Image: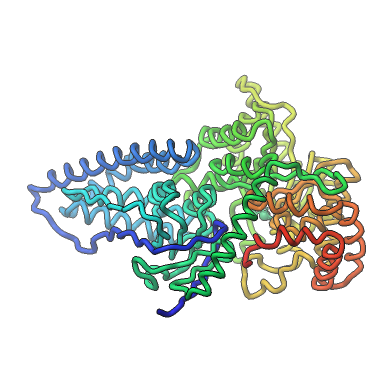
Amino acid sequence: MDIIRLRGIGVSPGIAMGDVLLPKRVVFTSRKELVPAAQVEDELKRLGKAIERTRADLVRVRETIKDKMGEESSFIFEAHLLILEDPSLHTGLENIIRQEKTRAEWALSKTNTRYEQLFESLNDEYFRQRKSDVSDVLTRIYKNLAARREEEKESGREHILVAHELLPSEAATRLGRSEATLGVALDMGGRTSHTAILARSMNIPAVLGLRNITSQVREGDFVIVDGTGGEVIVNPPAAVRREYQAKKEKYEIYRRELQKTARLKALTLDRVRANLLANIELPEEVPMAMSLGAEGIGLFRSEFIYLRTTSLPSEEDHLAIYNRIAREAAPRPVYIRTLDIGGEKSLPQLNIEQEPNPALGLRAVRFSLRNKPLFRIQLRAILRASRQKNVRILIPMVTEVEEIIEVKDMFEDVKDELRREKQKFDEKIPMGVMIEVPAAAALTDLMLREVDYVSIGTNDLIQYFLAVDRSNEFVSYLYKPFHPGVLRLIRSVIQSAQKMEKEVTVCGEMAADPLSAIVLMGFGLRTFSMNPIFIPRIKKALRSIEAKTAEKIVAEALKLSSAQEIEEYVIEEILVRHPQVFLTSRPLEPGH
Ligand code: PEP
Ligand code: MG
Protein backbone atom coordinates (compact mmCIF):
# COMPACT_ATOMS: atom_id res chain seq x y z
CA MET A 1 0.00 0.00 0.00
CA ASP A 2 1.20 3.49 -0.85
CA ILE A 3 1.92 5.93 1.91
CA ILE A 4 0.13 9.24 1.44
CA ARG A 5 0.99 12.36 3.40
CA LEU A 6 -1.62 15.11 3.42
CA ARG A 7 -1.07 18.60 4.73
CA GLY A 8 -3.78 20.62 6.42
CA ILE A 9 -4.25 22.96 9.35
CA GLY A 10 -3.35 21.52 12.74
CA VAL A 11 -6.11 22.93 14.93
CA SER A 12 -5.76 20.74 17.99
CA PRO A 13 -2.28 19.50 18.96
CA GLY A 14 -1.16 15.95 19.68
CA ILE A 15 -0.88 12.71 17.76
CA ALA A 16 -3.57 10.09 17.23
CA MET A 17 -3.49 6.91 15.21
CA GLY A 18 -6.09 4.34 14.31
CA ASP A 19 -8.57 3.04 11.75
CA VAL A 20 -10.60 5.40 9.63
CA LEU A 21 -14.32 5.82 10.21
CA LEU A 22 -16.10 7.56 7.35
CA PRO A 23 -19.62 8.48 8.42
CA LYS A 24 -22.27 8.47 5.68
CA ARG A 25 -23.13 11.87 4.29
CA VAL A 26 -26.63 13.11 3.67
CA VAL A 27 -26.89 14.29 0.09
CA PHE A 28 -29.69 16.71 -0.66
CA THR A 29 -31.71 15.72 -3.71
CA SER A 30 -31.02 17.52 -6.96
CA ARG A 31 -34.32 16.30 -8.43
CA LYS A 32 -37.35 18.54 -8.24
CA GLU A 33 -40.08 16.00 -7.58
CA LEU A 34 -43.59 17.41 -8.12
CA VAL A 35 -46.74 16.40 -6.23
CA PRO A 36 -50.39 16.73 -7.32
CA ALA A 37 -52.08 19.85 -5.92
CA ALA A 38 -54.23 17.71 -3.63
CA GLN A 39 -51.13 16.33 -1.93
CA VAL A 40 -49.56 19.66 -1.06
CA GLU A 41 -51.19 19.70 2.37
CA ASP A 42 -49.83 16.19 3.09
CA GLU A 43 -46.32 17.38 2.17
CA LEU A 44 -46.67 20.32 4.54
CA LYS A 45 -47.74 17.93 7.31
CA ARG A 46 -44.79 15.68 6.57
CA LEU A 47 -42.48 18.69 6.84
CA GLY A 48 -44.16 19.75 10.10
CA LYS A 49 -43.59 16.28 11.59
CA ALA A 50 -39.94 16.25 10.52
CA ILE A 51 -39.45 19.65 12.15
CA GLU A 52 -41.06 18.36 15.34
CA ARG A 53 -38.77 15.31 15.37
CA THR A 54 -35.78 17.54 14.73
CA ARG A 55 -36.75 19.69 17.70
CA ALA A 56 -36.96 16.60 19.92
CA ASP A 57 -33.58 15.37 18.59
CA LEU A 58 -31.88 18.67 19.25
CA VAL A 59 -33.22 18.93 22.79
CA ARG A 60 -32.10 15.35 23.47
CA VAL A 61 -28.58 15.90 22.08
CA ARG A 62 -28.30 19.20 23.94
CA GLU A 63 -29.02 17.45 27.24
CA THR A 64 -26.54 14.63 26.50
CA ILE A 65 -23.81 17.11 25.64
CA LYS A 66 -24.55 19.17 28.72
CA ASP A 67 -24.09 16.04 30.85
CA LYS A 68 -20.93 14.93 29.10
CA MET A 69 -19.15 18.14 28.29
CA GLY A 70 -20.75 20.78 30.45
CA GLU A 71 -23.03 23.72 29.83
CA GLU A 72 -20.49 25.61 27.73
CA SER A 73 -20.48 23.05 24.93
CA SER A 74 -24.24 22.83 24.48
CA PHE A 75 -24.49 26.34 23.02
CA ILE A 76 -24.41 24.90 19.51
CA PHE A 77 -27.75 23.25 20.11
CA GLU A 78 -29.27 26.37 21.60
CA ALA A 79 -28.25 28.12 18.40
CA HIS A 80 -29.69 25.30 16.30
CA LEU A 81 -32.98 25.36 18.15
CA LEU A 82 -33.15 29.10 17.43
CA ILE A 83 -32.51 28.49 13.73
CA LEU A 84 -35.14 25.73 13.76
CA GLU A 85 -37.72 28.04 15.35
CA ASP A 86 -37.03 30.91 12.96
CA PRO A 87 -40.43 31.68 11.36
CA SER A 88 -38.79 32.84 8.13
CA LEU A 89 -37.28 29.37 7.69
CA HIS A 90 -40.71 27.75 8.07
CA THR A 91 -42.49 30.17 5.72
CA GLY A 92 -39.67 29.89 3.20
CA LEU A 93 -39.97 26.10 3.07
CA GLU A 94 -43.78 26.18 3.01
CA ASN A 95 -43.81 28.72 0.21
CA ILE A 96 -41.60 26.52 -1.97
CA ILE A 97 -43.84 23.49 -1.37
CA ARG A 98 -47.07 25.46 -2.00
CA GLN A 99 -45.93 27.54 -4.96
CA GLU A 100 -43.85 24.95 -6.78
CA LYS A 101 -46.01 21.96 -5.69
CA THR A 102 -42.98 19.92 -4.80
CA ARG A 103 -41.92 17.42 -2.20
CA ALA A 104 -40.47 18.71 1.06
CA GLU A 105 -37.06 17.23 0.15
CA TRP A 106 -36.79 19.63 -2.77
CA ALA A 107 -37.77 22.62 -0.60
CA LEU A 108 -34.99 21.73 1.85
CA SER A 109 -32.49 21.17 -0.93
CA LYS A 110 -33.29 24.51 -2.57
CA THR A 111 -33.14 26.37 0.74
CA ASN A 112 -29.81 24.77 1.61
CA THR A 113 -28.30 25.77 -1.75
CA ARG A 114 -29.53 29.32 -1.26
CA TYR A 115 -27.84 29.59 2.14
CA GLU A 116 -24.68 27.96 0.85
CA GLN A 117 -24.38 30.51 -1.92
CA LEU A 118 -25.06 33.36 0.47
CA PHE A 119 -22.39 32.28 2.95
CA GLU A 120 -19.85 31.29 0.30
CA SER A 121 -20.01 34.78 -1.18
CA LEU A 122 -18.63 36.18 2.06
CA ASN A 123 -14.94 36.81 2.29
CA ASP A 124 -14.28 35.94 5.87
CA GLU A 125 -13.45 32.37 6.85
CA TYR A 126 -15.37 32.56 10.11
CA PHE A 127 -18.52 33.78 8.39
CA ARG A 128 -18.26 31.06 5.78
CA GLN A 129 -18.05 28.48 8.50
CA ARG A 130 -21.38 29.61 9.94
CA LYS A 131 -23.19 28.19 6.92
CA SER A 132 -22.73 24.79 8.50
CA ASP A 133 -25.07 25.73 11.36
CA VAL A 134 -27.95 26.35 8.98
CA SER A 135 -26.95 23.31 6.93
CA ASP A 136 -26.87 21.20 10.06
CA VAL A 137 -30.45 22.04 10.93
CA LEU A 138 -31.67 21.53 7.36
CA THR A 139 -29.85 18.16 7.17
CA ARG A 140 -31.50 16.98 10.36
CA ILE A 141 -34.94 17.92 9.04
CA TYR A 142 -34.09 16.18 5.76
CA LYS A 143 -33.11 12.96 7.56
CA ASN A 144 -36.26 13.14 9.63
CA LEU A 145 -38.45 13.25 6.51
CA ALA A 146 -37.71 9.57 5.91
CA ALA A 147 -40.49 7.37 7.28
CA ARG A 148 -38.04 4.97 8.85
CA ARG A 149 -35.25 6.91 10.43
CA GLU A 150 -31.89 5.42 9.85
CA GLU A 151 -29.91 5.77 13.02
CA GLU A 152 -26.23 5.34 12.34
CA LYS A 153 -25.03 2.36 14.22
CA GLU A 154 -21.58 2.73 15.49
CA SER A 155 -19.75 0.07 17.32
CA GLY A 156 -18.09 2.45 19.77
CA ARG A 157 -14.82 1.04 18.46
CA GLU A 158 -11.89 3.45 18.62
CA HIS A 159 -11.43 5.29 15.34
CA ILE A 160 -10.11 8.31 13.51
CA LEU A 161 -13.05 10.29 12.25
CA VAL A 162 -12.60 11.34 8.61
CA ALA A 163 -15.26 13.45 6.92
CA HIS A 164 -15.77 16.17 4.37
CA GLU A 165 -17.18 18.55 6.93
CA LEU A 166 -18.67 17.94 10.36
CA LEU A 167 -21.92 19.65 11.07
CA PRO A 168 -21.57 21.39 14.44
CA SER A 169 -24.03 19.13 16.21
CA GLU A 170 -22.35 16.09 14.73
CA ALA A 171 -18.99 17.40 15.93
CA ALA A 172 -20.32 17.85 19.44
CA THR A 173 -21.96 14.41 19.55
CA ARG A 174 -19.02 12.54 18.10
CA LEU A 175 -16.25 14.39 19.89
CA GLY A 176 -18.21 14.12 23.11
CA ARG A 177 -17.62 10.39 22.87
CA SER A 178 -13.93 11.04 23.16
CA GLU A 179 -13.20 7.46 24.21
CA ALA A 180 -14.09 6.32 20.68
CA THR A 181 -12.96 9.29 18.57
CA LEU A 182 -9.18 9.34 18.83
CA GLY A 183 -8.53 11.96 16.17
CA VAL A 184 -10.26 14.02 13.52
CA ALA A 185 -9.34 14.75 9.89
CA LEU A 186 -11.62 16.84 7.68
CA ASP A 187 -11.56 18.14 4.12
CA MET A 188 -13.02 21.45 5.26
CA GLY A 189 -12.76 23.70 8.28
CA GLY A 190 -10.29 26.04 9.85
CA ARG A 191 -9.04 27.23 13.20
CA THR A 192 -12.25 28.91 14.25
CA SER A 193 -14.71 26.18 13.28
CA HIS A 194 -16.78 24.53 15.99
CA THR A 195 -14.96 21.27 15.36
CA ALA A 196 -11.62 22.96 16.03
CA ILE A 197 -12.83 24.54 19.27
CA LEU A 198 -14.42 21.32 20.49
CA ALA A 199 -11.41 19.20 19.55
CA ARG A 200 -9.13 21.53 21.48
CA SER A 201 -11.34 21.52 24.54
CA MET A 202 -11.66 17.72 24.41
CA ASN A 203 -7.94 17.23 23.76
CA ILE A 204 -8.53 15.34 20.55
CA PRO A 205 -5.81 15.83 17.91
CA ALA A 206 -7.34 17.30 14.77
CA VAL A 207 -6.21 18.37 11.31
CA LEU A 208 -8.74 20.30 9.22
CA GLY A 209 -8.72 21.92 5.80
CA LEU A 210 -7.18 18.83 4.16
CA ARG A 211 -9.21 19.48 0.97
CA ASN A 212 -9.67 15.93 -0.25
CA ILE A 213 -8.81 13.39 2.43
CA THR A 214 -12.26 11.78 2.04
CA SER A 215 -11.36 10.72 -1.50
CA GLN A 216 -7.92 9.46 -0.48
CA VAL A 217 -8.89 7.06 2.30
CA ARG A 218 -11.29 4.18 2.74
CA GLU A 219 -13.09 2.92 5.80
CA GLY A 220 -10.65 0.83 7.83
CA ASP A 221 -7.44 2.41 6.45
CA PHE A 222 -4.86 3.09 9.15
CA VAL A 223 -3.98 6.78 9.56
CA ILE A 224 -1.85 8.99 11.76
CA VAL A 225 -3.25 12.42 12.65
CA ASP A 226 -0.53 14.84 13.66
CA GLY A 227 -2.49 17.77 15.08
CA THR A 228 0.69 19.61 16.06
CA GLY A 229 2.31 19.44 12.65
CA GLY A 230 -0.94 19.68 10.65
CA GLU A 231 -0.38 16.44 8.77
CA VAL A 232 -2.23 13.17 8.15
CA ILE A 233 -0.33 10.07 7.07
CA VAL A 234 -2.32 7.31 5.39
CA ASN A 235 -1.24 3.68 5.67
CA PRO A 236 2.23 4.37 7.07
CA PRO A 237 4.81 1.55 7.08
CA ALA A 238 5.82 0.05 10.42
CA ALA A 239 8.89 2.28 10.78
CA VAL A 240 6.81 5.46 10.44
CA ARG A 241 4.25 4.09 12.90
CA ARG A 242 6.99 3.46 15.41
CA GLU A 243 8.40 6.94 14.87
CA TYR A 244 5.00 8.51 15.54
CA GLN A 245 4.26 6.21 18.45
CA ALA A 246 7.43 7.54 20.07
CA LYS A 247 6.44 11.15 19.23
CA LYS A 248 3.00 10.51 20.68
CA GLU A 249 4.45 9.26 23.95
CA LYS A 250 6.83 12.19 24.14
CA TYR A 251 4.02 14.60 23.46
CA GLU A 252 1.86 13.06 26.15
CA ILE A 253 4.62 13.37 28.73
CA TYR A 254 5.08 16.96 27.61
CA ARG A 255 1.35 17.65 27.89
CA ARG A 256 1.20 16.25 31.41
CA GLU A 257 4.14 18.42 32.31
CA LEU A 258 2.39 21.45 30.82
CA GLN A 259 -0.76 20.66 32.76
CA LYS A 260 1.27 20.79 35.92
CA THR A 261 2.78 24.07 34.74
CA ALA A 262 -0.72 25.50 34.25
CA ARG A 263 -1.19 25.47 38.00
CA LEU A 264 2.13 27.18 38.72
CA LYS A 265 2.80 30.91 38.76
CA ALA A 266 4.40 32.58 35.75
CA LEU A 267 7.53 33.42 37.67
CA THR A 268 11.01 33.74 36.18
CA LEU A 269 14.07 32.19 37.90
CA ASP A 270 14.84 35.59 39.42
CA ARG A 271 11.24 35.80 40.65
CA VAL A 272 9.87 38.36 38.25
CA ARG A 273 6.11 37.84 37.91
CA ALA A 274 4.46 37.72 34.48
CA ASN A 275 0.74 37.83 33.83
CA LEU A 276 -0.59 35.43 31.21
CA LEU A 277 -4.02 36.15 29.78
CA ALA A 278 -6.14 34.49 27.10
CA ASN A 279 -7.38 35.72 23.72
CA ILE A 280 -10.81 34.26 23.03
CA GLU A 281 -13.41 34.43 20.32
CA LEU A 282 -16.30 32.60 21.93
CA PRO A 283 -17.65 32.69 25.49
CA GLU A 284 -17.43 28.90 25.55
CA GLU A 285 -13.66 29.15 25.59
CA VAL A 286 -13.47 30.68 29.07
CA PRO A 287 -13.42 27.44 31.12
CA MET A 288 -10.73 25.93 28.91
CA ALA A 289 -8.65 29.12 29.15
CA MET A 290 -8.91 29.04 32.94
CA SER A 291 -7.96 25.38 33.10
CA LEU A 292 -4.83 26.19 31.08
CA GLY A 293 -3.80 28.76 33.65
CA ALA A 294 -5.12 32.03 32.15
CA GLU A 295 -5.17 34.83 34.67
CA GLY A 296 -7.90 36.66 32.82
CA ILE A 297 -9.26 37.28 29.34
CA GLY A 298 -6.84 39.73 27.73
CA LEU A 299 -8.76 39.99 24.49
CA PHE A 300 -12.32 39.04 23.65
CA ARG A 301 -12.72 39.54 19.91
CA SER A 302 -16.32 40.76 20.07
CA GLU A 303 -16.88 40.65 16.31
CA PHE A 304 -17.58 36.96 16.76
CA ILE A 305 -20.91 37.83 18.39
CA TYR A 306 -22.10 39.13 15.02
CA LEU A 307 -21.17 35.90 13.35
CA ARG A 308 -23.48 33.83 15.49
CA THR A 309 -26.70 35.40 14.36
CA THR A 310 -28.16 36.08 10.97
CA SER A 311 -29.59 39.39 12.16
CA LEU A 312 -27.84 42.18 14.04
CA PRO A 313 -27.29 41.32 17.71
CA SER A 314 -29.36 43.37 20.13
CA GLU A 315 -28.06 45.07 23.26
CA GLU A 316 -29.43 42.13 25.24
CA ASP A 317 -27.56 39.65 22.98
CA HIS A 318 -24.30 41.51 23.62
CA LEU A 319 -25.05 41.78 27.32
CA ALA A 320 -25.78 38.08 27.76
CA ILE A 321 -22.40 37.19 26.24
CA TYR A 322 -20.38 39.80 28.17
CA ASN A 323 -22.11 38.84 31.41
CA ARG A 324 -21.33 35.22 30.85
CA ILE A 325 -17.65 35.84 30.16
CA ALA A 326 -17.32 38.25 33.08
CA ARG A 327 -19.08 35.83 35.44
CA GLU A 328 -17.04 32.81 34.39
CA ALA A 329 -13.73 34.66 34.50
CA ALA A 330 -14.43 36.55 37.76
CA PRO A 331 -12.61 37.86 39.68
CA ARG A 332 -10.05 37.90 36.89
CA PRO A 333 -10.18 40.80 34.40
CA VAL A 334 -11.91 40.62 31.02
CA TYR A 335 -10.90 43.01 28.24
CA ILE A 336 -13.73 43.35 25.75
CA ARG A 337 -12.49 44.68 22.45
CA THR A 338 -15.11 46.62 20.53
CA LEU A 339 -16.05 45.51 17.04
CA ASP A 340 -13.08 44.96 14.71
CA ILE A 341 -14.95 44.58 11.46
CA GLY A 342 -14.69 46.13 8.02
CA GLY A 343 -12.05 45.70 5.41
CA GLU A 344 -12.02 42.10 4.30
CA LYS A 345 -14.12 41.01 7.29
CA SER A 346 -17.61 41.74 6.08
CA LEU A 347 -20.81 41.53 8.05
CA PRO A 348 -23.56 39.72 6.16
CA GLN A 349 -26.15 41.64 8.16
CA LEU A 350 -24.89 44.98 6.87
CA ASN A 351 -24.20 46.13 3.39
CA ILE A 352 -20.58 47.04 3.81
CA GLU A 353 -19.18 48.60 0.69
CA GLN A 354 -16.36 46.80 -1.07
CA GLU A 355 -13.24 48.85 -0.66
CA PRO A 356 -10.27 48.95 -3.06
CA ASN A 357 -7.75 48.60 -0.22
CA PRO A 358 -9.64 47.07 2.68
CA ALA A 359 -6.72 46.72 5.13
CA LEU A 360 -6.33 50.48 4.98
CA GLY A 361 -10.04 51.13 4.91
CA LEU A 362 -13.02 51.58 7.17
CA ARG A 363 -12.01 49.00 9.77
CA ALA A 364 -12.46 48.58 13.51
CA VAL A 365 -12.90 51.89 15.40
CA ARG A 366 -13.14 53.75 12.10
CA PHE A 367 -16.16 51.62 11.24
CA SER A 368 -17.67 52.00 14.71
CA LEU A 369 -17.39 55.79 14.63
CA ARG A 370 -19.12 55.82 11.24
CA ASN A 371 -21.88 53.53 12.50
CA LYS A 372 -22.65 55.14 15.80
CA PRO A 373 -26.06 53.56 16.48
CA LEU A 374 -24.40 50.14 16.25
CA PHE A 375 -21.45 51.26 18.38
CA ARG A 376 -23.78 52.75 21.00
CA ILE A 377 -25.53 49.38 21.44
CA GLN A 378 -22.20 47.71 22.09
CA LEU A 379 -20.98 50.40 24.50
CA ARG A 380 -24.25 50.24 26.47
CA ALA A 381 -23.94 46.45 26.77
CA ILE A 382 -20.29 46.61 27.88
CA LEU A 383 -21.15 49.24 30.48
CA ARG A 384 -24.11 47.25 31.79
CA ALA A 385 -21.90 44.14 32.05
CA SER A 386 -19.33 46.18 33.99
CA ARG A 387 -21.54 45.89 37.10
CA GLN A 388 -19.49 42.78 37.71
CA LYS A 389 -16.42 45.03 38.19
CA ASN A 390 -13.97 42.92 36.21
CA VAL A 391 -14.89 44.29 32.76
CA ARG A 392 -12.53 46.54 30.81
CA ILE A 393 -12.80 48.00 27.37
CA LEU A 394 -10.33 47.97 24.50
CA ILE A 395 -10.59 50.06 21.32
CA PRO A 396 -9.04 48.51 18.19
CA MET A 397 -6.95 50.17 15.49
CA VAL A 398 -6.78 53.75 16.67
CA THR A 399 -4.60 56.00 14.54
CA GLU A 400 -4.89 59.37 16.21
CA VAL A 401 -5.75 60.90 19.58
CA GLU A 402 -8.90 62.53 18.16
CA GLU A 403 -10.44 59.10 17.69
CA ILE A 404 -9.95 58.34 21.37
CA ILE A 405 -11.54 61.65 22.31
CA GLU A 406 -14.53 60.92 20.10
CA VAL A 407 -14.97 57.46 21.62
CA LYS A 408 -14.64 58.86 25.13
CA ASP A 409 -17.25 61.55 24.44
CA MET A 410 -19.63 58.93 23.22
CA PHE A 411 -18.82 56.74 26.20
CA GLU A 412 -19.67 59.59 28.60
CA ASP A 413 -22.90 60.19 26.72
CA VAL A 414 -23.87 56.55 27.03
CA LYS A 415 -23.00 56.60 30.75
CA ASP A 416 -25.31 59.63 31.23
CA GLU A 417 -28.05 57.82 29.40
CA LEU A 418 -27.67 54.76 31.65
CA ARG A 419 -27.65 56.94 34.76
CA ARG A 420 -30.90 58.52 33.62
CA GLU A 421 -32.35 55.05 33.14
CA LYS A 422 -31.07 54.08 36.61
CA GLN A 423 -29.03 51.26 35.14
CA LYS A 424 -26.02 50.25 37.20
CA PHE A 425 -22.49 50.09 35.81
CA ASP A 426 -18.90 50.42 36.96
CA GLU A 427 -18.26 54.17 37.14
CA LYS A 428 -14.53 53.47 37.02
CA ILE A 429 -14.53 51.02 34.12
CA PRO A 430 -11.01 51.24 32.64
CA MET A 431 -10.52 51.97 28.96
CA GLY A 432 -7.51 51.21 26.78
CA VAL A 433 -6.50 51.19 23.13
CA MET A 434 -4.85 48.68 20.85
CA ILE A 435 -1.54 49.77 19.38
CA GLU A 436 -1.76 48.29 15.90
CA VAL A 437 -1.04 51.24 13.63
CA PRO A 438 2.59 52.48 13.60
CA ALA A 439 1.44 56.09 14.03
CA ALA A 440 -0.33 55.09 17.24
CA ALA A 441 2.86 53.41 18.44
CA ALA A 442 4.71 56.68 17.96
CA LEU A 443 2.04 58.44 20.02
CA THR A 444 1.89 55.97 22.89
CA ASP A 445 2.64 58.62 25.53
CA LEU A 446 -0.01 60.98 24.19
CA MET A 447 -2.55 58.19 23.88
CA LEU A 448 -1.82 57.12 27.43
CA ARG A 449 -2.76 60.58 28.66
CA GLU A 450 -6.26 59.73 27.50
CA VAL A 451 -6.59 56.08 28.49
CA ASP A 452 -5.62 53.64 31.24
CA TYR A 453 -3.58 51.10 29.26
CA VAL A 454 -2.42 49.96 25.83
CA SER A 455 -2.40 46.53 24.25
CA ILE A 456 0.01 45.92 21.40
CA GLY A 457 -1.59 43.97 18.55
CA THR A 458 1.58 42.73 16.91
CA ASN A 459 -0.28 40.92 14.13
CA ASP A 460 -1.49 44.18 12.65
CA LEU A 461 1.33 46.38 13.91
CA ILE A 462 3.89 44.29 12.01
CA GLN A 463 1.76 44.19 8.87
CA TYR A 464 1.31 47.96 8.81
CA PHE A 465 4.86 48.77 9.89
CA LEU A 466 6.55 46.50 7.37
CA ALA A 467 3.89 46.98 4.66
CA VAL A 468 3.43 43.20 4.50
CA ASP A 469 -0.07 41.72 4.32
CA ARG A 470 -0.30 39.33 7.28
CA SER A 471 -2.26 36.76 5.27
CA ASN A 472 -0.55 36.98 1.89
CA GLU A 473 1.68 33.95 1.38
CA PHE A 474 3.64 35.66 -1.44
CA VAL A 475 5.13 38.17 0.95
CA SER A 476 5.15 36.06 4.10
CA TYR A 477 8.96 35.80 3.90
CA LEU A 478 9.03 39.52 4.75
CA TYR A 479 6.74 39.21 7.77
CA LYS A 480 9.40 39.25 10.47
CA PRO A 481 8.59 39.88 14.12
CA PHE A 482 12.37 40.05 14.78
CA HIS A 483 12.94 42.77 12.18
CA PRO A 484 15.10 45.23 14.12
CA GLY A 485 12.73 48.05 13.24
CA VAL A 486 9.77 46.12 14.65
CA LEU A 487 11.63 45.28 17.87
CA ARG A 488 12.69 48.90 18.38
CA LEU A 489 9.13 50.05 17.82
CA ILE A 490 7.68 47.55 20.29
CA ARG A 491 10.34 48.37 22.84
CA SER A 492 9.54 52.07 22.56
CA VAL A 493 5.83 51.42 23.20
CA ILE A 494 6.64 49.31 26.26
CA GLN A 495 9.07 51.91 27.57
CA SER A 496 6.63 54.81 27.04
CA ALA A 497 3.98 52.94 29.01
CA GLN A 498 6.43 52.13 31.78
CA LYS A 499 7.53 55.75 32.01
CA MET A 500 3.94 56.74 32.53
CA GLU A 501 3.43 53.85 34.95
CA LYS A 502 0.61 52.50 32.86
CA GLU A 503 -0.24 48.93 31.96
CA VAL A 504 0.99 47.50 28.65
CA THR A 505 0.15 44.11 27.15
CA VAL A 506 1.07 42.29 23.96
CA CYS A 507 -1.91 40.40 22.56
CA GLY A 508 -0.68 39.50 19.07
CA GLU A 509 0.82 36.15 18.10
CA MET A 510 4.27 37.27 19.29
CA ALA A 511 3.12 36.76 22.87
CA ALA A 512 2.53 33.07 22.14
CA ASP A 513 5.96 32.32 20.71
CA PRO A 514 8.49 31.33 23.40
CA LEU A 515 11.47 33.10 21.86
CA SER A 516 9.52 36.30 21.18
CA ALA A 517 8.01 36.19 24.67
CA ILE A 518 11.51 36.10 26.16
CA VAL A 519 12.54 39.07 24.01
CA LEU A 520 9.41 40.97 25.12
CA MET A 521 10.20 40.10 28.72
CA GLY A 522 13.65 41.55 28.10
CA PHE A 523 12.00 44.80 26.98
CA GLY A 524 10.20 44.92 30.32
CA LEU A 525 6.84 43.49 29.25
CA ARG A 526 5.00 41.70 32.05
CA THR A 527 1.53 41.01 30.60
CA PHE A 528 1.07 38.64 27.68
CA SER A 529 -2.25 37.66 26.10
CA MET A 530 -2.51 34.71 23.72
CA ASN A 531 -4.53 31.81 22.38
CA PRO A 532 -5.04 29.85 25.61
CA ILE A 533 -3.52 26.63 24.29
CA PHE A 534 -0.13 28.37 24.27
CA ILE A 535 -0.27 29.64 27.87
CA PRO A 536 1.45 26.59 29.42
CA ARG A 537 4.35 26.66 26.99
CA ILE A 538 4.95 30.38 27.53
CA LYS A 539 4.75 29.87 31.27
CA LYS A 540 7.25 27.07 30.97
CA ALA A 541 9.62 29.22 28.88
CA LEU A 542 9.41 32.18 31.26
CA ARG A 543 9.92 29.91 34.27
CA SER A 544 13.14 28.67 32.66
CA ILE A 545 14.87 32.04 32.34
CA GLU A 546 15.98 35.00 34.37
CA ALA A 547 14.37 38.31 33.44
CA LYS A 548 17.74 39.92 34.07
CA THR A 549 19.40 37.68 31.47
CA ALA A 550 16.61 38.38 28.96
CA GLU A 551 17.22 42.12 29.43
CA LYS A 552 20.94 41.73 28.77
CA ILE A 553 20.41 39.52 25.71
CA VAL A 554 17.95 41.90 24.04
CA ALA A 555 20.06 44.96 24.77
CA GLU A 556 22.87 43.33 22.78
CA ALA A 557 20.52 41.91 20.14
CA LEU A 558 19.18 45.34 19.28
CA LYS A 559 22.64 46.37 18.10
CA LEU A 560 22.33 43.86 15.25
CA SER A 561 20.96 44.85 11.88
CA SER A 562 18.91 41.90 10.61
CA ALA A 563 16.10 39.70 11.85
CA GLN A 564 18.13 36.59 11.17
CA GLU A 565 21.15 37.80 13.15
CA ILE A 566 18.93 38.81 16.04
CA GLU A 567 17.13 35.49 16.13
CA GLU A 568 20.37 33.50 15.96
CA TYR A 569 21.98 35.63 18.64
CA VAL A 570 19.00 35.28 21.01
CA ILE A 571 18.81 31.51 20.49
CA GLU A 572 22.55 31.04 21.06
CA GLU A 573 22.59 33.15 24.19
CA ILE A 574 19.60 31.36 25.66
CA LEU A 575 21.09 27.99 24.77
CA VAL A 576 24.21 28.86 26.71
CA ARG A 577 22.46 30.29 29.76
CA HIS A 578 19.06 28.59 29.98
CA PRO A 579 18.93 25.57 27.65
CA GLN A 580 15.82 24.23 29.38
CA VAL A 581 13.75 26.84 27.50
CA PHE A 582 14.21 24.79 24.36
CA LEU A 583 14.05 21.39 25.94
CA THR A 584 10.55 22.08 27.06
CA SER A 585 8.90 24.60 24.81
CA ARG A 586 10.00 23.77 21.28
CA PRO A 587 8.16 20.50 20.66
CA LEU A 588 4.75 22.24 20.72
CA GLU A 589 5.69 24.73 18.06
CA PRO A 590 3.47 24.40 15.02
CA GLY A 591 5.33 22.46 12.38
CA HIS A 592 7.29 20.33 14.85
C1 PEP B 1 -3.40 41.91 16.47
O1 PEP B 1 -3.56 42.59 15.45
O2 PEP B 1 -2.27 41.56 16.89
C2 PEP B 1 -4.56 41.44 17.25
C3 PEP B 1 -4.42 40.83 18.40
O3 PEP B 1 -5.80 41.63 16.70
P1 PEP B 1 -6.43 40.69 15.54
O4 PEP B 1 -5.49 39.52 15.36
O5 PEP B 1 -7.78 40.32 16.02
O6 PEP B 1 -6.45 41.61 14.37
MG1 MG C 1 -5.53 43.43 15.05
Q: Nearer the viewer, residue 335 or 435?
A: 335
Q: Quadrant of residue 360?
A: bottom right
Query: Could you tell me which residue is drawn at 48 percent across and 37 percent down?
Result: 70
Image-quarter location of ligand 1: bottom right
Query: Could you tell me which residue is drawn at 47 percent across and 75 percent down?
Result: 237
Q: Quadrant of the N terminus?
A: bottom left
Q: Check the image and report above or below for 42 versus 206.
A: above
Rendering coords of residue 158 (x, y %): 40, 56
Rendering coords of residue 244 (x, y %): 55, 67
Rendering coords of residue 387 (x, y %): 65, 26
Q: Check the image and report above or below for 20 versus 396.
A: below
Rendering coords of residue 371 (x, y %): 59, 45
Name, please, the residue furthest toward the bottom: 2
User: What is the total number of numbered labels drawn onto the structure image?
Assistant: 0
Q: Quadrant of residue 335?
A: top right
What's the coloring here? rainbow
Residue 254 appears in the figure: yes
Query: Could you tell me which residue is drawn at 75 percent across and 42 percent down?
Result: 265
Q: Quadrant of the C terminus?
A: bottom right
Q: Nearer the viewer, residue 264 or 24?
A: 264
Horizontal arrangement in the rendering, residue 407 relative to residue 173 (left or right): right
Horizontal arrangement in the rendering, residue 61 relative to residue 201 (left or right): left
Residue 98 appears in the figure: no
Horizontal arrangement in the rendering, residue 44 relative to residue 76 (left or right): left
Q: Nearer the viewer, residue 255 or 349?
A: 255
Query: Could you tell me which residue is drawn at 34 percent across and 37 percent down?
Result: 59
